[in-house]
Amino acid sequence: MAGALETAGRVLLVGGGNMGGAMLRGWLEAGLDPAAVAVLDPNGAPLLADIVSRGVRLAAAPAEVERGADTVILAVKPQVMEAVLPTLLPLLADDTLIVSVAAGRTVASIEAALGERPVVRAMPNTPALVNRGITGAYPNARVTGPMRARAQALLESSGPVEWVEREALIDAVTGVSGSGPAYVFLLAEALAEAGVAAGLDPALAMRLARHTVAGAGELMIRSGDEPAQLRRNVTSPNGTTQAALEILMADDGFGPLLRRAVLAARDRAEALSRA
Ligand SMILES: NC(=O)C1=CN([C@@H]2O[C@H](COP(=O)(O)OP(=O)(O)OC[C@H]3O[C@@H](n4cnc5c(N)ncnc54)[C@H](OP(=O)(O)O)[C@@H]3O)[C@@H](O)[C@H]2O)C=CC1
Ligand SMILES: O=C(O)[C@@H]1CCC=N1
C-alpha cells in the first residue's frame, strides 16, 4: 500500500475534521509522507494537533497554502462547500484532481464552482480511522486512468474502494456505509441499555455490547460465510437467539426499520444536492 501511495503526489486536505482527519490518519498509517500533505482548516483542525507535530503542514487560509497539489480532497460540510470552493481556485492547476467526500454535493455543483476539471465524488466512512473503512466512488469523464489510480490509492489506504457506475448511487452508498457506522454505534448503545433492563450493571452491559458488536463485525470480515449463515450459527432451534430473532425479524422489525432509515439518509443526500 505504501508503494501505491508513493504515486499520490502532493495532497491538500480541505477540512481536517472527523472524516478528513480519519482519512489523513489512514494515509499516514499506510505510509504517505507527512511532508506531502497540507491541511487547510481555518480553526487549526484541533482533532489533528498530534498529526501536525509529525510534519503535516497546516494552513488557516488558502493564501497560506503552497500551490501545486496534485490532489485536493474536499472534506468540509456540504453547507460550506459553496463558500469554500471559489477560494481554492488560485491553488488549482488544470489537471489537479479533486476528490470530494461531501454528502449530497454533486460533481456538477463542484464543476459549477471550479470549472470543468477531473472530479471524483467519494463517500468514505469514519472506520477509516482504524483502517476498517469502505468507500464508494464515482469519477467524472475528465478523470484519467492514472488519476483514478491515484484516487484509489488514497481512498483504499483505509479500506476497499467500490467504484459505482452512476453518480446517483453515491447517495445510496451514503445511506448504507457513509452513515452506517452511526447505526452500528446506536445498536451498541441500545444493546447496552437492554442489558441494563435485563439486570446488568451499566458498565458491564456496555463492555458486553461493545465487544459483541466489534467481535461480530470482525468475524463477518474474516469468515468466508454470509452474515445470514453466521446468524444461523448462533441460533439454536428453540433456543435463546430464536426467541430474540422472532421479535427482531417480525414484519415491523429490524429489517423494515433499517430500510426506512437507509432510504431517509439517501433521500437527505439527494435533497442536499438540490439545496
Ligand atoms: N463524518 C462522517 O462520518 C462522514 C462525513 N462525510 C462528509 O465529510 C465532510 C466533513 O464532515 P465531518 O468531517 O463530519 O465534519 P467536521 O465538521 O468534523 O469537519 C469539517 C472540518 O472543516 C473545517 N472547515 C470549516 N470551514 C472550512 C473552510 N472554509 N476551509 C477548510 N476547512 C473548513 C471545520 O472547521 P470548524 O469545525 O472550525 O468549522 C472542520 O474542521 C462532510 O461533507 C460530510 O458529508 C462523508 C462520509 C462520512
Ligand atoms: O451525516 C452526514 O451527513 C455525513 C455523511 C455520511 C456520514 N456523515
Image: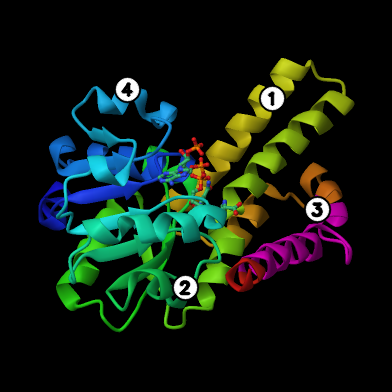
Query: Is residue 43 shown above or below 24?
Result: above
Residue at x-position 51% and y-position 71%: 170
Q: Which one is in front, 267 or 118?
A: 118
Query: For numbered disc 1, what is the local secondary structure?
Result: helix
First of labels 3, 2 by sequence position: 2
- How much space separates mark 4 and mark 3, taking CA atoms? 44 Å
Q: Which mark is residue 245?
A: 3
Indicate which label's residue lies in the foreground, 3 or 2: 2
User: Which residue is denoted by mark 4 in the rendering?
Assistant: 50
Mark 4 and mark 2: Cα distance apart in space = 34 Å
Q: How many marks?
A: 4
Circles 4 and 3: CB distance less than 8 Å?
no
Q: Amino acid at mark 1?
A: Met
How many angstroms separate mark 2 from mark 1 (CA)?
43 Å
Point out residue 50 in the picture as x, y percentages from the top left corner.
Answer: 32, 22
> Does label 4 or label 1 sit earlier along the sequence?
4
Task: Determine whether, in the image, residue 16 is placed left or right of residue 70.
Answer: right
SS for dot 4: helix
Q: Which mark is residue 206?
A: 1
**Residue 149 appears anywhere in the view:** yes
The mark that comes first in sequence, 2 or 1, is 2
Magenta range:
245-269
- Percent coordinates x, y for residue 212 in the rendering: 62, 35
Q: Give the mark toward the camera: 1 or 3.
A: 1
Identify residue type, mark 4: Asp
- Mark nearest the camera among 4 and 2 is 2
Residue at the disc numbered 2: 109
Real-space Cα separation, disc 4 to disc 1, in angstroms: 29 Å
Residues at marks 4 and 1 touching, judged by CB atoms closer than 8 Å: no
Using the rendered view, name the quadrant where residue 255 is placed.
Answer: bottom right
